[in-house]
Image (spheres, rainbow, N blue to C red):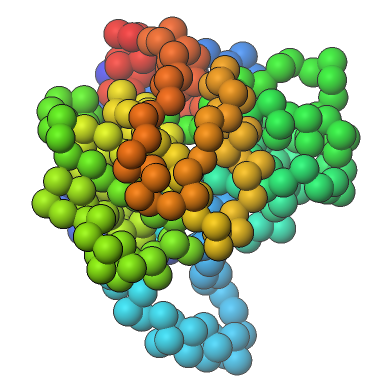
Amino acid sequence: MQWITVPPALDLRSQEPCLSNKRHPPQPVQRMTTFAKSPPPFLHNGAIPLYAYGFRPWPIAMPLRTRMRKALWVGRHLYRRIHHRHNFGDYLSAELVRRIAIDPVAIVEERRPGKLLAIGSVLWALEDGDVVWGSGALNDKPMPPRSNVRCLAVRGPLTERVLVQQGSLRQEAIKPLYFDPAILIGHIYSELRHMRSIKNRTLVIPHYSDWHHLHEWRSHGLLSSDCEVVNPLDHPRSIARRIAMAGRVISSSLHGLIIAESLGIAAIPFKLTDNREPSFKYEDYYAGSGRSTPLFRNTLQSALDSEAPVGPKWDDAFLRRALASFPYPIRSSLAAKQAAL
């Protein structure tokens, strides 16, 4: 085994490498490939080119006028950047890829060809030569066809159908796996597997567009010490820990449902009447996990009075295939877990 230094962790708030890397000191890393026979995609300046919704790349060389506009933009959004104001599902895409891959991660623009698309309904950003690993379509509307797309996994069969109709995925091609990479969160945050859930605790995870209903829920007495609400703009690790300690989860956020079910926590979906999120992505996820779409309650009160639908059946063999489908070399610690599954 050869001793090499892991590249500095990427600070996803500033899109610059962290100078402090106390969490990940130099450690022995063995470069191990996944089970996929195809070679890994090309790197972008030695890093994995990833598009993650909500993050903006910061090029090194830019004109003075552009630098001034960037500085003004940073000033307006400084508070958001410091205090991490990203939807946790979108943030998890970059966080999960960074923790799985040996190579560093570079956030790139949505129109860059040859990039990686992971967590999220981001196929609208699909370009020629892109690699799709667990992404989903936002709706069933047609998109421009793309060439040389490498599709390893999609969120579900509805997304696969959109890609076939688009012409970016041939019907005779190798069938992609159905899963959202968020189901692997227990692999990147190993402490989640050892947390004990509290049976009588209910955790509410609203979609970020539903956050304005918080005052209404409190005024109606729906929230208490046994029924807490989590801010969907918190860090995904913090949210995942609270999910792992809950007895059940009630969520209008898709990744709140996915993370809960991946940790074996009962998940009850709800969708408020004024929520304009398309039902397509929820139907796609449930179909991809081999289930029909359950009934979505339209109020928090009705969701609190409901029973959770039957959860997915992700066995160790499937999780091993999901991790092995990652298109780049993975960390040796994850490879060891993969072999132990």
Q: Is residue 240 above or below residue 18?
A: above
Q: Residue 190: where, in percent of width, then height?
A: 22, 29
* Residue at point 44%, 62% (across, down): 210
Horizontal and vertical percent for residue 216?
Answer: 33, 68
> In the figure, residue 4 lies in which quadrant?
top left
Evaluate whether residue 338 shows in this view: yes
- In depth, the one of 75 and 88 nearer the eye is 88
Asked where in the image residue 32 lies, by quadrant, the reply is top left
Q: Residue at x 14, y 46 (%)?
A: 226
Visible residue check, residue 155? no
The answer to whether residue 187 is left or right of residue 286 is left
Rendering coords of residue 71 (x, y %): 46, 87
Residue drawn at x 37%, y 35% as measured from the top left: 306
In which quadrant will I find the N terminus? top left
Which residue is located at x 25 percent, y 68 percent? Answer: 219
User: Residue 231's image quarter?
Assistant: bottom left
The C terminus lies in which quarter of the figure? top left
State whether residue 174 is above or below residue 211: above
Q: Nearer the viewer, residue 304 or 158?
A: 304
* Circle count: 0
Residue 280: percent from the left, percent from the top? 66, 42
- Judge by depth and name the residue closer to the eye, 236 or 70: 236
